Image: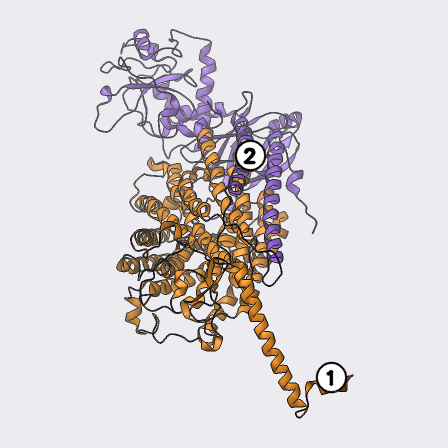
Chain colours: A orange, B purple
């Protein structure tokens, strides 16, 4: 790939003209179209596509649950559902979105697709384990969906005992088995990433030359392999208690229900970081590319990921201030919860500082990334209210908590997921999405999202508990507002679904590097060949070799060239219109 | 839209006011930082947007001083919030001594509440203003959470445990009582009201209901009806501990282990508190009063949690009664197990004499408190004691 030099920095050359772009003759998609070639593929990119398709289906299931929940809350006595059905719907929403969408979303799709090309490798370290992880996911998702179809689950995604082990009807065991299987899929993905990043980096790609995307995924993988086994143990214990009446958590059998909460949150709080760290990974890449600048304070951002992964393991007790947890234990969890806010804040400040002196363009991925920065900030600072024990005993289990984690999970993780989708869509498919539609959808989502979830902060402070099928009438106004917002947000989700499909056939051809981005993944063709690179790249510089000045210069030159073409064209048109009379003549005539 | 927050009007305790103040300060900090980030992003996007003339020379890639500043300033702020919140929370967890104690049982999907004077309420709680109200709570089935938004407090209500919360209402009025922990189908209907009344009015209200007896009196009936008195009564032929004065005092127990004969197990001293009485009734094999045979049958499934509350109230009332008698009961409060053994001795013949006041007594064949038996604080014994440490504040 060619580059030009500005000052002492080498920057990528402008994209070739559109007409010169073409889809490569052979790439990872068209090598073989057979079912078998997809279902038995060992290619990390194809596995990523398999994940993309399957988690999109699961997102649809989860969104259906959310839609029914929001519709029902239009009326204080429940607009459309009986409490029983309502409980099943919010449980479905939670279980599906957490276990079958958010946890695999960015790592299993974009991590899978991008980590090998980003580090100059042909594939992940264990391609067969990668495929196995997808089958485990599919098994888990099938069991989970089966549970929803054949009776549903009304425990919430938290499966608290003894409700889940003795009192809940429905297909609780199936759903637990599904989450159990999906957990192993997550462990295998994490394991694969860690080994790949350690062993398969291209020559010259030292740790501090890695894109922050890889750093963040590395931190995520650590949580996946260290935390998920505890979830597996917890779920297995629940299954054993529910099936064989062995007392583990149920006090009537001699168990301890608070033990279940400790074990559950030991995984499920770090799991929040499994969902958000990959989002941070994406934002670092997008912000750098669309402000044409290296990420400010690279090492701080990289180590902040690790700090989040480590401290994140020590804060689970902040979900349990209102249980029988002792105040001293609560204080320790509280101080650690405040501490974990710091590396997140460092990241936000560094991304914002990256914009300083940049050459900022607001393409769709950047809209999502900027949305992430602001919404994640709101989600983060409202965590302070919940980390503080004195205010948490009021806010715990209210809509304040719901709003807080949706600001992080939707405003953060899903914004980043969609940002990644638009940013790397040309790499994955070889074609561009329609930019104008992309921006419309991003803006709809941002507006709809805030309208949906901001009122929920107020609802929570007002004292409306979560998981309520019916509610005191004074909460109706804010609930209606929230439901209205969710319908706008729903539109924002539907649009990309359609235009991305459309672009597969009609989108303009992207070429290898439509964003003039610097990562190794942009140095291969779009879509990439099966083994990513024709020859292994050698890395000699750090990541993000962008220069805003060079870009401005290039843009200005391109503008000049375009203006000159325009001028020549206009001149020709006028001359033709006047039968060969010159422009000067025309001007004189006008005067 | 006019911002109308009814919750601020429904603020009915000093803790609620302090909690709101803290909430307001955190919210202000949160708003300033969110808006600050938002404005910075908007400013940069406008100022450095592509094609706008601006100075982009020598963009900084890192700056350690800036990093240190924006790491340490938020750190100081959040540690400040932590200190404030934790001090406030600890002061809330310190249970005032003169509280009016009310029993709460959560069950799918209602709250059953018994006033000490005996009156029962469902999904309603009437309390006098100006006096600390202490709730001692347990659940018959799943985990619930007793939530009074107007007091800004909630406490999980956990089966197999007693948890406690307290509040001191300072404003007369009727407020929401909600279940905050998802507990099954009708979770959202497990709601009611908390009515705060003037003390005089509360006394009138107490007298209004048709309830024949106090909690302790109801407990006494249960004590007889369920045959407790057959063993634990004054002149019982069965060797079982007398319960007079036992409540709230340290007693030695043996915690059986599978495969180990009971007489080889060292005794431990714990406080015969509400948790202990409860577990002795439903899980008698868990802790056996030292020196007695483990012959107590379980009453699990035969007694509701409400009835256990009443029995406990009765046993508690026995303490007051027997205080006046003070027979030869050894003072056990300050004794080590060795002293205790020396004082009590093991004389199997005269049970009543020895067991008065719930002290362990001669088991004939076993050493109730073997020499060297260690003293263990109650909080470290048993699986369900942790809940009862709620409200004692930090040590």
Question: Measured from the top left, where is residue A530 in percent x and y?
Answer: 32, 68
Rounded to the nearest whole Å, what is the CA distance between mark 2 and mark 1? 73 Å
> Is B155 above or below relative to A212?
above
Quarter holding the C terminus of chain A? bottom right
Indicate the chain on which mark 1 is placed.
A
Circle 1 SS class: helix
**Image point (72%, 86%), residue name:** A586
Is residue A420 shown left or right of residue B129? left
Question: Measured from the top left, where is residue B6 in percent x and y?
Answer: 66, 42
Say few, some or many: other residues with alpha carbon within 10 Å of mark 1 (under 14 / 14 to 19 / 20 or more): few
Residue A587 — which label? Answer: 1
Question: Measured from the top left, where is residue B74 in percent x and y?
Answer: 54, 39
Circle 2 SS class: helix
From this viewpoint, is residue A74 visible?
no
Residue of label 2: B81
> In the depicted view, which residue is nearer to us: B321 or A139?
A139
> In the depicted view, which residue is nearer to us: A568 or A27?
A568
């Amino acid at each position: 790939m060619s580059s030009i030099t500005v000052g002492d920095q080498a920057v990528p050359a402008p994209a070739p003209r559109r007409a010169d772009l073409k889809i490569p003759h052979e790439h990872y998609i068209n090598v073989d179209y057979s079912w078998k070639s997809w279902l038995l593929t060992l290619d990390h990119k194809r596995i990523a596509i398999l994940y993309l398709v399957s988690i999109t289906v699961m997102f649809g299931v989860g969104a259906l649950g959310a839609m029914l929940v929001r519709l029902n809350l239009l009326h204080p006595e429940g607009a459309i559902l009986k409490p029983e059905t309502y409980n099943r719907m919010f449980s479905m929403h939670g279980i599906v979105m957490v276990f079958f969408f958010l946890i695999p979303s960015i790592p299993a799709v974009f991590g899978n697709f991008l980590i090998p090309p980003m580090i100059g490798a042909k594939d992940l370290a264990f391609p067969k384990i990668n495929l196995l992880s997808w089958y485990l996911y599919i098994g888990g998702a099938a069991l989970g969906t089966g549970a929803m179809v054949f009776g549903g689950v009304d425990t919430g995604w938290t499966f608290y005992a003894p409700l889940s082990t003795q009192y809940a009807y429905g297909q609780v065991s199936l759903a637990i088995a599904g989450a159990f299987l999906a957990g192993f899929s997550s462990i295998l993905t994490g394991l694969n990433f860690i080994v790949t990043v350690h062993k398969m980096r291209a020559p010259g790609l030292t740790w501090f030359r890695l894109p922050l995307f890889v750093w963040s995924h590395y931190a995520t993988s650590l949580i996946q392999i260290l935390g998920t086994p505890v979830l597996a143990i917890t779920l297995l214990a629940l299954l054993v208690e529910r099936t064989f009446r062995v007392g583990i958590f149920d006090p009537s059998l001699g168990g301890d229900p608070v033990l279940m909460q400790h074990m559950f949150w030991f995984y499920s709080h770090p799991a929040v970081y499994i969902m958000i760290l990959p989002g941070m990974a994406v934002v670092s890449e997008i912000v750098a590319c669309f402000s044409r600048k290296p990420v400010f304070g690279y090492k701080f951002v990289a180590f902040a990921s690790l700090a989040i992964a480590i401290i994140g393991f020590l804060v689970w007790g902040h979900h349990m201030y209102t249980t029988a947890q002792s105040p001293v234990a609560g204080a320790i969890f509280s101080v650690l919860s405040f501490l974990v806010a710091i590396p997140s804040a460092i990241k936000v400040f560094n991304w914002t500082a990256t914009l300083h002196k940049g050459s900022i363009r607001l393409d769709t991925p950047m809209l999502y990334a900027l949305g992430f920065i602001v919404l994640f900030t709101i989600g983060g600072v409202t965590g302070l209210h919940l980390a503080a024990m004195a205010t948490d005993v009021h806010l715990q289990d209210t809509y304040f908590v719901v709003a807080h984690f949706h600001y992080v999970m939707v405003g953060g993780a899903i914004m980043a997921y969609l940002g990644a989708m638009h940013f790397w869509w040309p790499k994955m498919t070889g074609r561009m999405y329609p930019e104008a539609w992309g921006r419309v959808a991003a803006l709809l989502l941002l507006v709809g999202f805030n309208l949906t979830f901001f009122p929920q902060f107020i609802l929570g402070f007002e004292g409306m508990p979560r998981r309520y099928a019916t509610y005191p009438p004074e909460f109706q106004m804010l609930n209606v507002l929230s439901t209205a917002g969710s319908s706008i947000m729903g539109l924002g989700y539907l649009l990309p679904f359609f235009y991305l499909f459309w672009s597969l056939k009609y989108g303009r051809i992207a070429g290898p590097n439509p964003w003039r981005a610097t990562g190794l993944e942009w140095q291969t063709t779009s879509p990439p060949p099966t083994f990513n690179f024709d020859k292994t790249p050698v890395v000699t510089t750090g990541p993000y070799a962008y220069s805003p000045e060079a870009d401005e210069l290039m843009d200005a030159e391109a503008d000049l060239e375009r203006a000159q073409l325009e001028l020549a064209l206009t001149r020709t048109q006028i001359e033709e219109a006047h039968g060969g009379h010159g422009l000067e003549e025309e001007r004189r005539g006008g005067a | 839209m006019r911002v109308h927050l009814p919750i601020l009007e429904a603020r009915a305790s000093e803790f609620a006011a302090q909690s709101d103040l803290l909430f307001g300060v955190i919210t202000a900090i949160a708003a300033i930082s969110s808006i600050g980030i938002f404005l910075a992003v908007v400013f940069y996007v406008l100022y450095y947007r592509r094609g706008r003339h601006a100075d982009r020379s020598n963009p900084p890639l890192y700056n350690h001083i800036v990093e240190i500043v924006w790491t340490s300033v938020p750190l100081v702020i959040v540690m400040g919030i932590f200190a404030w919140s934790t001090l406030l929370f600890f002061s809330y967890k310190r249970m005032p001594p003169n509280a009016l104690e009310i029993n709460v049982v959560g069950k799918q999907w209602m709250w059953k509440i018994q006033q000490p004077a005996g009156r029962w309420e469902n999904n309603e709680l009437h309390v006098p203003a100006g006096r600390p109200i202490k709730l001692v709570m347990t659940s018959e089935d799943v985990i619930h959470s007793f939530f009074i938004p107007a007091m800004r407090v909630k406490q999980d209500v956990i089966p197999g445990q007693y948890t406690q919360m307290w509040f001191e209402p300072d404003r007369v009025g009727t407020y929401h009582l909600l279940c905050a922990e998802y507990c099954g189908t009708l979770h959202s209907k497990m709601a009611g009201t908390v009515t705060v009344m003037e003390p005089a009015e509360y006394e009138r209200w107490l007298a209004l209901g048709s309830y024949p007896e106090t909690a302790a009196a109801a407990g006494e009936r249960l004590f007889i009806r369920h045959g407790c008195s057959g063993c634990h009564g004054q002149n019982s032929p069965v060797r079982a501990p007398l319960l007079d004065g036992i409540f709230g005092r340290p007693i030695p127990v043996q915690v059986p282990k599978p495969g180990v004969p009971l007489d080889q197990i060292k005794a431990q001293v714990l406080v015969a508190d509400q948790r202990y009485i409860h577990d002795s009734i439903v899980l008698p094999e868990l802790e056996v009063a030292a020196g007695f045979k483990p012959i107590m049958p379980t009453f699990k499934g035969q007694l509701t949690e409400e009835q256990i509350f009443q029995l406990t109230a009765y046993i508690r009332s026995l303490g007051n009664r027997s205080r006046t008698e003070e027979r030869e009961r050894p003072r056990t409060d300050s004794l080590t197990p060795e002293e205790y053994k020396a004082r009590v001795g093991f004389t199997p013949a005269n049970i009543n004499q020895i067991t008065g006041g719930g002290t362990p007594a001669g088991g004939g064949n076993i050493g109730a408190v073997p020499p060297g038996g260690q003293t263990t604080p109650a909080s470290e014994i048993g699986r369900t004691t942790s809940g009862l440490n709620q409200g004692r504040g930090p040590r």
